[in-house]
Amino acid sequence: MYFPIGWPKVLKNLEADGQVIKQIVSNRDKILFVSLTNESFVIWFCKPTVPIVFHKRNADSVERLGFNVGVEWKPDSSMICISTSEGHLIIYNVEAQSEQTAYNQFDPPTASLRRDSAELFVKETIPSLKITVFKEILVWDGQITRMCCISGTEILVCTTRAHLLRYRWDGTQNRDYCLDLGRIPFSINQQVSKAEPILEDNTHVNDIEYSPLVCGFGITLNDGRAAYLTAPNLKFDPNAVQGIWAPAIDDATCVRVNHKFRLIAIGRRNSQVDVFTIDEVTGGLELSHTMALSSKDFPGDPGPVKCIRWTADGRSVAVSWEGGGVSTWSTFGALLMCSLAWDYGLSQDLGKHNPLVVSSMEWATEGYQLWMVKVEGDSSSNLIQMDFIKSPLSVNPCMSNQRHLYLQADDKLYVNLEDNLTRRTKISMIDSSEYQENGLTDELAPEYDNKVKYREFVDDNECRKQWKVLPLPATYIAANWPLRYSAIDEGGVNVCVAGRTGLAHYSCASRRWKLFGNEAQEKDFVVTGGMLWWRDHVVIGCYSIIDGHDEIRFYPREAKLDNRSAKMVRVQVQVFALDALDDQLVVFTADALVTIYELSIDKNGGVEMRCVQAVDISALSHPACVVSAALCRLQEQPGPPHLARPPTSSPLAPDSLVINASGKLMMVQREEYDVDEDNNPVRNVVIIML
């Protein structure tokens, strides 16, 4: 869940002669952004939002090669490729100048004007970049419609002659693996024996995106059809590529792929976005849901969908329309924000003219900002930046078992504890009607009898929507921006956070933050697999930069934040997710292994871990597509007396393991275990699709 906060910021347009910005594209880390115009481009830094380098092509280059059309980053951010209107590719080297930074701060000689607060010191290193032309390539295949980076070594170029050409970043063409739409068989699924290529003339790709987790490309054609290109392996041999049509789509405008949930979102001319999933049985595209504005959201027609952008975690998507307006939706179609419902004053008629027309968008790092190109008319445009806050569940799903509501921004938390959310009253299930008729309040109610069953009555009228804003300490977040993970304990008293490196935790009782006393220790590990509270310990899955391996760490709350007081357990591969139920810790790692540990406190106050079970789920899903892995306690509902089971002396069944993979819920039913000759736990498991 992502929600906008504050007013959008307008960035100064550095393009020469007020040229219209065509596109805004971020690098893989979403720290650097490039804005493209007909003759120039600017590379921006995310935080602080400042331009780093401006490059304008000379008149001779524009005359020979044509105007700029599109731009793509190399995954390591060392190169940029620009396509032109005359069918050329221009590859630029992007070199970081290690001996200097782009911006430096200096205090004035006047003592009263010098900085004395940590908030005024920018600790972020803004690189100084040098742009040089590496190669100019003539494609010789019509005009270039779209580019798509498919690996660290290759980029895919789509042309008006229905070709998908693969170029290496050194400028050479990989001819053996270039694709021709006229030779790719298309069908409704992978089980149909009859498949036909595209025989119509003047049909080409106008939008494309690649995802290795989907094992293919999502494409839209200029005639309004949409499809999914796949192959048995990621080499994409031209003789093995197959096209799968998106059913009932004849007005597609753009496409974007959700990698984590394996969804393909297709924008349409009727202002809707159809989201498809891949049927695991037939291999065809199956409609999952549709994102459509209701008459309550906007009674008019915003026009065809112009742009779609998923967040990096796949938990939200931004959509803009050609007629104006921008919206954000959850993964499975809940409307979170729509600018068409904003109040623009009595002078604005959104049916005739929308003041917010967005032609291109891009999410910033961790999804805290949405960069947009706002069209001001036929000859001008601006870059605007909208800030967002998000649910911690988007990155730390183990917080789903908490009763407290809180949201995280890039440098602060918005907390609303359970006591503020609801007023709970216990009512006897026998005398609840009499309780309500007499109008007894909590103060007048008698003491509860432990022998009587009660139910909780939640009075939503007593909810308080007051948010407590908890700013992160400047000494920590200035060097570790942005906030990545956060966790709150069951009582809502303690909060822990993790940024780029290290961690910090806060006590609501003492209203004090606790940071690492040794800054070197704070910089030597990165939280990668989430964080949670267990008893009085902060539990994290992290990567040790100094030692070069992954670990599970336990930091006691009462002790100083120091590695000497921490319990460190080395794991073989990267930790993706953590969860806990009572004294059981669930660890999901990059080798698709879900390991369950029993936690305990020894006589010296240290944490002890004992492996109980390990479940391999590699056959169910790719590890990167697993959203969460958690334990749950299923309770059998009491039935009629004649159907009641007789009591048994066997122990209770162990807690069930629930796995969310790409939005599909699976339950691993665990059985009681024995130990083998090496004293290792051995269990049989049954997997149930929910």
Image: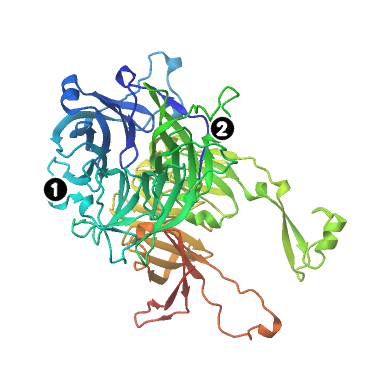
Left/right of residue 205 with respect to residue 116 in the rendered view? left
Question: How far from the left and from the top, in percent, is residue 546?
Answer: 29, 49
Q: Residues within 10 Å of mark 1 (few under 14, many from 20)?
A: some
Residue tagged 1: 174
The quarter holding residue 478 reads top left
Choose between 185 and 381: the one closer to the eye.
185
| Numbered circles on residues, count | 2
**Regarding mark 1 in the picture, which secondary structure is present there?**
loop
- Residue displayed at 52% across by 38% down: 338
**Residue 158 visible in the displayed image:** yes
**Residue 601 visible in the displayed image:** no
Name of the residue lying farthest toward the front: 200
The quarter holding residue 449 reads bottom right
Spatial separation of the CA atoms under disc 2 and disc 1 = 49 Å
Question: How far from the left and from the top, in percent, is residue 3?
Answer: 52, 41
Q: Amino acid at mark 2?
A: Trp
Q: Amino acid at mark 1?
A: Asn
Residue tagged 2: 342
Choose between 289 and 339: the one closer to the eye.
289
